[in-house]
Amino acid sequence: MPTKLVVDCSTGVTTEVELTAEEIAQREADAAAFAEQKAAEEAAAQAKAEAKAAAEAKLAALGLTADEIAALSK
Amino acid sequence: MANTYTPISTVTVGSGGASSIDFTSISQSYTDLILKISARTSASGNVLDLRIRVGNGNVDTGSNYKYLELTGIPSASIVAGGGGTTDKFNTIHPGSSVTASTFGSVEVYVPNYASSDKKSMSTDAITENNSSNTQLRLQAWLWDSTSTINTISIFPSSGTFDQYSTATLYGIKNS
């Protein structure tokens, strides 16, 4: 059973407490939401990288050198 | 200028790990609070969210946490900004994919936590790693509540805090 550490600052006593079923469910929901958010961020980063590569390829096809293309993004 | 810096409580996670660290019954006798965290998490990943909720009695789970942030990713020469409103504060700390026995650092400054004003805070956090994939995050937070703060909960986005993770809460007085 997962536990949490609860510090009572008025006494300085730290207690290890088992999570309730509700807390476990909330943590699992939080973890799932975080995984979903990370996946969305990675997909967005991948799409951005692919768009950048496609744009650079089109610029190269127009005759720009690699240095000229790189200068555009600085 | 604050002339005191009093450790209120320190927690070190034991061998079984911990799903969260909760500071409760925080004295209202200080002017400001400082929370210092050294942590890593069992879940896979280099950079994971470290979440913080505050409250009075119970932590606030409503969408009352506002933030502005700058994130730096040195290996990619990226600085990204962001902001919004959520149901918790999110800073960063390392997961299990970083170098073994390496912990991230977080500091949260909470001025006027016992006042009846809304609570602004500032944070800085880094994920340590002995290779790449490190991050730095600077944030301005606002807990959109006039309640005083006497409870703070710290928990990872997934997994549990590893053994030897620590959290220390300090009180600061202005006189």
Image: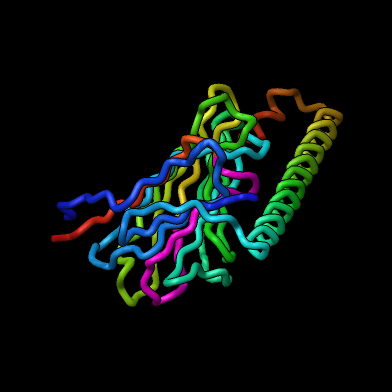
Q: Residue at x 58, y 39 (%)?
A: B41
Horizontal side, residue B76 vs residue B10: left or right: right
State the count of labels.
0
Q: Residue at x 39, y 73 (%)?
A: B118
Name the quadrant of the C terminus of chain A: top right
Q: Residue at x 62, y 50 (%)?
A: A2
Q: Is residue A9 above or below residue B76?
A: below
Q: Compare residues B2 and A71 and report the one nearer the observer.
A: B2
Quarter of the view holding residue B45: top right
Horizontal side, residue B118 vs residue A46: left or right: left
Q: Do we see residue A65 in this rendering?
A: yes
Return the x and y of residue B136 as percentages of the image width and height.
50, 39
Horizontal side, residue B64 vs residue A11: left or right: right
Q: Do we see residue B79 in this rendering?
A: no
Range drawn in magenta? B140-161
Residue B119 painted magenta: no
